[in-house]
Amino acid sequence: MRPANSSTASWLAAAVFAGAMTISGGLAAAQPAPDSENGRYSMTPIPEGVLRLDTRTGTVSTCAKNGAGWACYAVPDERTALDAEIGRLQAEVEKLKGQLAAGPTVSGKIDEALPKTDPLKKPEPQAREPKVTEGDRKIEIPLPSDQDVDRVMSFLEKAWRRLIDMANRVQKDVSGKI
């Protein structure tokens, strides 16, 4: 066997040291995932880490690896809030049923009939139509005056004349080109 020179020994020592660091670094980096505690938890990988379902309580948590190891945080449970609201509403319903069963609780009853009009309501402006009583309901449509009829007739006459003039011009243009 030949004696090892110093450069070969230092190279061999560096290789052993690098291998040891790789193995120990791998062990330090490969911390175990959260324990599944005898099948109590169901784990599902997600991009941020692991989604953990507690099969006994139904609680869902997200577990992620940080500098100190794995940390799990419970996901907010809407079901708990809904159950609390349902319970509150059921208690309110039972309370209202009890009040209803106890009978009417009208206080300050008076023997006089209440007025049919609102004293705080402003009176409506008077219209041109005559007042109609409750039992005598008639719809009355005001007819146009003679002045209104004359205005409409004048408008229609002007529109008719313009239409005839336009038709005559079109006829002259067409006959002149043929």
Image (cartoon, grey):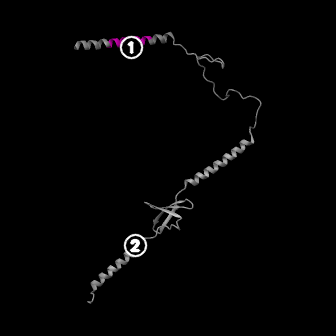
Q: Which mark is residue 159?
A: 1
First to last magenta residue range:
153-166
Q: Is residue 146 left or right of residue 89?
A: left
N-terminal label among 2 and 1: 2
Q: Residue 117's spot in the image, x, y percent? A: 68, 26
Q: CA distance from mark 2 to mark 1?
A: 97 Å
As helix, strand or loop, the secondary structure at mark 1 comes to helix
Q: Residue at x 33, y 12 (%)?
A: 165
Q: Residue 5's spot in the image, x, y percent? A: 27, 87
Question: Quadrant location of residue 9?
Answer: bottom left
- The amino acid at mark 2 is Gly
Above or below — where is 165 with respect to 77?
above
Return the residue found at the far right.
111
Q: Which mark is residue 26?
A: 2
Q: Are marks 2 and 1 in contact (CB under 8 Å)?
A: no
Of residue 55 and residue 81, the one placed in the foreground of this image is 55
